[in-house]
Amino acid sequence: MRVAVDAMGGDKAPHEVVKGAVRASQQFPDDEILLVGDEKAIHRELTSCGTTPRNVTIHHAPQVVGMDDPATSSIRQKINSSITRSVELVAKREAAAVVSAGHTGATVAAATLHLRTLKGVRRPGIAAPFPTRSGACLVIDVGANIACKPVHLFQYGVMATIFSKHIFGIKNPRVGLLNIGEEDAKGNDLAKETFGLLSDSDLNFVGNVEGREIFDGKADIVVCEGFVGNVLLKFGEGLSMGILSTIKAEAMKGFWTKVGLFLCKPAFGPLRAKMDFTEYGGVPLLGVNGVCIICHGRSDSKAIQNAIRVALQLSKNKVNEHIISELDKASAPAANVT
Amino acid sequence: MRVAVDAMGGDKAPHEVVKGAVRASQQFPDDEILLVGDEKAIHRELTSCGTTPRNVTIHHAPQVVGMDDPATSSIRQKINSSITRSVELVAKREAAAVVSAGHTGATVAAATLHLRTLKGVRRPGIAAPFPTRSGACLVIDVGANIACKPVHLFQYGVMATIFSKHIFGIKNPRVGLLNIGEEDAKGNDLAKETFGLLSDSDLNFVGNVEGREIFDGKADIVVCEGFVGNVLLKFGEGLSMGILSTIKAEAMKGFWTKVGLFLCKPAFGPLRAKMDFTEYGGVPLLGVNGVCIICHGRSDSKAIQNAIRVALQLSKNKVNEHIISELDKASAPAANVT
């Protein structure tokens, strides 16, 4: 199976991206990795890695979408960018999946434009794991779709359920609806209508989930519209990093607290691991016709290696085929609301 | 000045509420406190306090709105509830302010119904302080209005600016717009139109604020629609408590980490203080014709005492009068968008 990797995307590209791709190629010797981007730059990085595995090839793309470029127009204008070329390889079925740590908006735009949606899918959504007390909660959507309709949220529940089953191995994932209260009739029109769709579905719907219940692990999956999900993802990242850095800064002010922090260090480990995005590697854009994994802009080689693993898992487990057939089965309730 | 206190509202009512009110009455001997609720229950609590200050009086209200009651209908049905009666005292100008730790939705509904909005205000909004690295960021709205228009968000910016100036003593508060990116043209239609209104205003508008920038303190005030604000408030509460309890639980597993935690304890102090809602006491529902302070359901006597202090500050500083005159000045841009 072939994975196209945007070698120029991310704060640490191409160095860490190429390094991660090389490691993944060694971890998955039966699969192929296409490094897409500036040929010379990728060559240089491969040389510095000391090896070019036989299952790694370069696919030249001279342009780069910068982090400050506008998402949609850059995709239309920079047709030779590493992001666009990577996605095109999937569109032409020359690769099964694309992995990019570049401009998220541009990746979503390129994937939506060139791959289009899976049969039956109304809007793609990004599913990101949030740390919880006991593991992770998959929140979908975290920024692909900021004009959500109830049917979009319902479909996010279906797609994330299939993803959780096949990738996280959760048998019957609990699906919750992000809302401002626990009672059934709470929330805005979007929440109320989505509540009805989810209640009538075959999903393991556990009702409304309030903000504070995400960390408590009330649900394995929480659906919400992309604006809220994006704000929440970034707020959580900022807050958790802020809390840990504040504790550290305070502890460093005194001798005994400094000693205490040193002794206490192992207690922070499990939390740091939960919050470590490099473990998951990347998050899927679910609903496009092809596998698309979006990585954090600060991804290092470990994150890229894990993202390639997730991309291969999605492809090999035929997650997209399962989504099509599940949505086909569920089309009756979904068709009722537009 | 008189403050009506809903003696039956909150998880720890009436005991902690009455205790907090008695303390506030001693702190502010020139002001009056009306304890609204079941006469016998309040009497019992006053007896257990060992004193009934001369500036505390009881106003009998036989009904209580429970935490599980539906907000709007309970206000219409339970016309003798402590919440409704407290708000009515303000409506009849028998009190300047109301303080309640009861059902938030019911308090907002009662205040909106009986007090109505200030001249020029389109929708009331709840302004809640979020902890930041260096202090606090006032987020408005956190749940009063889940069908926001751009002009509502613009007015929240105006109202929160006046509140910050008069209550927090910030000379020229920086106002940000919660959004999914830093660039001017980011976000959904609500965000884009609000951006225009805020840019054209006299407010100290610092542009879009992403989720992760709240804790960093990019702005003193962040405006957002009530659904997002409510989810964010509860998510932040759950996440920060979850992080601290996870660290503690992990540290308690080993001998040396337990010692470390003990030594490290002072380093957690400033963070805990920042996250301690009892310090602020309560959050204002800005925009209603009267002062309305909403307290956390878990409020103890310290929180109630501080909430009464905030209520008096708002009344004495004539925050509502300033809001009316500022909105009158700003009515030109606000009138452009509906």
Image (cartoon, coloured by chain):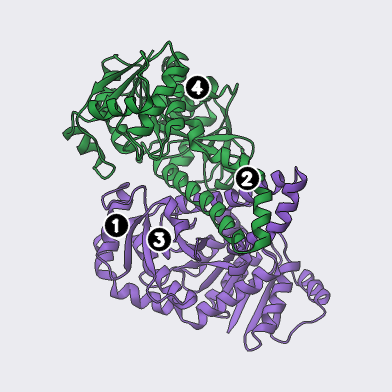
Chain colours: A green, B purple
Q: Distance between the residues labelled 2 and 3?
A: 27 Å
Alpha carbons under labels 4 and 1: distance apart: 38 Å
Q: Whole-Å distance between the Cαs marked 3 and 1?
A: 16 Å
Name the residue tied to disc 3: B218
* Residue at mark 1: B195
Give the mark, 2 or 4, whose residue is nearer the N terminus.
Answer: 4
| Residues marked 4 and 1, same chain | no
Q: Mark 4 points at which residue?
A: A162
Q: Which residue is drawn at 79% across and 74% down?
A: B43
Chain for disc number 1: B
Residue B320 seen in the figure: yes
Classify 10 Å Cα crowding around label 4: few (below 14), some (14-19), many (20 and above): many
The x, y position of residue A31, in whole percent, is 40, 13
Q: Mark 2 points at which residue?
A: A268
Which element type, helix, strand or loop, lies under badge 2?
A: helix
- Mark 2 and mark 1 in contact? Answer it, CB < 8 Å: no
Please tell me which residue lies in front, A83 or B324: A83
Left-right relation of B79 to A190? right
**Mark 3 touches mark 4? (CB < 8 Å):** no
Query: Mark 1: which amino acid?
Result: Phe
| Dot 3 and dot 1 within a common chain | yes
- How many callouts does the rendering have? 4
Q: Given the image, what chain letter belongs to the residue carrying mark 3?
A: B
Q: What element carries label 1?
A: helix
Badge nearest the viewer, 3 or 4: 3
Q: Along the line of sight, which residue is nearer the eye, A55 or A271?
A: A55
Amino acid type, mark 4: Ile
Q: Identify the element where label 4 is drawn.
A: helix
Q: Circles 3 and 1: CB distance less than 8 Å?
A: no
The earlier-in-sequence mark between 3 and 1 is 1
Helix, strand or loop at disc 3? loop
Q: Residue B294 occupies which quadrant of the picture?
A: bottom right
